Amino acid sequence: MIDFLVRITAEAGKLLLQSSRSVHNTKAGSGNWVTEADLASERYLIDSIHKTYPTHRILAEETHSDISHPEQEDHLWVIDPLDGTTNFSYGLPFFVISVAYVRRGIVQYGAVYDPSRNELFWAEKKKGAYLNDKKIHVSQESSLSCALVDVGSPYKKENFERTYPLGNKFHQAGSRTVNFGSAALECAYVASGRLSLYYEVGLKPWDVTAGALLIEEAGGKVVSEGKRFSPFHFERFLAGNPALINKALRLLSK
Ligand code: IPD
Ligand code: CA
């Protein structure tokens, strides 16, 4: 199944590179855009999964779903057909496809594909995380004063106010802050040690289901509201290596 998941994620990436970057419509809330490419990629992914696994359920960003308890589904696919839509439509090369397979609330396989760099991040539960064919690990950094922290920039005002200003706290602790505008890519960068931490409020399951598995399989930790992370029930998303997570939690609670 992992081979299938990785193959369709990469194929969807090729589709994105060939698609128009024009904005199709704007969902409720300024800045939350949908392009023709989101729709084409999602159509391709859903059709492929339905053909191979006709009884499996799918939770996808652009398609209405009647799944009320995703954590109870025996076979669930979670899809973000184009994460980083704003970057994509502006011609910035920071956008990815994210696909995960979940069994009864436990993420088994996940892949995040960056077609601009031909980088495929993937992970299998209890078998590690990889970038193309190389094993990846979270950063070893243990001091906030040397950390590179990705602070999200959500489009919704209430989420923005609970995320972006906290960049100031990290800055005061001596960290550098950045934002790549694609939650799934930011998770992949935490998993591969390119980012020390990633923090954002108000993300959705399709943004981070594959990414959270990548981080955990790369030796990192994902926390939310001080509890064990579930991609289906969370508000605040904080990810990084375990030593830095504890320091970041203390800093954010001050
Ligand atoms: C968005 C990106 C962005 C995050 C937003 C997400 P989209 O997903 O991941 O970085 O700040 O909250 O909605 O709309 O590009 O698929
Ligand atoms: Ca997304």
Image (tube, rainbow, N blue to C red):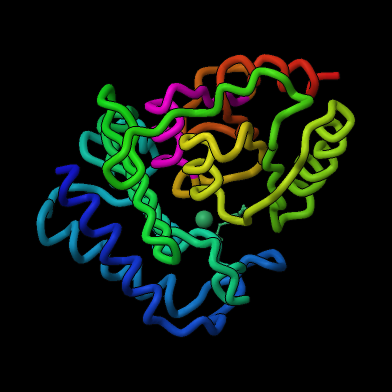
- Residue 179 in the image: x percent, y percent? 68, 50
107 sits to left or right of 197: left
Question: Is 103 displayed left or right of 243 in the figure?
Answer: left
Q: Quadrant of ligand 1?
A: bottom right
Q: Residue at x 52, y 34 (%)?
A: 193
Front position in the image: 60 or 99:
99
- Residue at image location 22% in from the left, 50% down from the top: 5
In which quadrant of the rendered image does the C terminus lie? top right
Examine the image and state in which quarter residue 225 appears: top right
46 and 179: which one is in front?
179
Q: Is residue 65 visible?
A: no
Compared with residue 223, is residue 232 higher up or lower down, i.e. above or below? below
Q: Magenta includes 16?
A: no
The answer to which of 85 and 10 lies nearer the viewer is: 10
Q: Measuring from the top left, give residue 16's x and y in whole percent.
A: 39, 73
**Is residue 164 found left or right of 216 in the rendered image?**
right
Q: What's drawn in magenta, residue-wise?
A: 208-224
The N terminus lies in quadrant = top left
Q: Nearer the viewer, residue 68 or 241?
A: 241
Which residue: 57% across, 79% down? Answer: 25
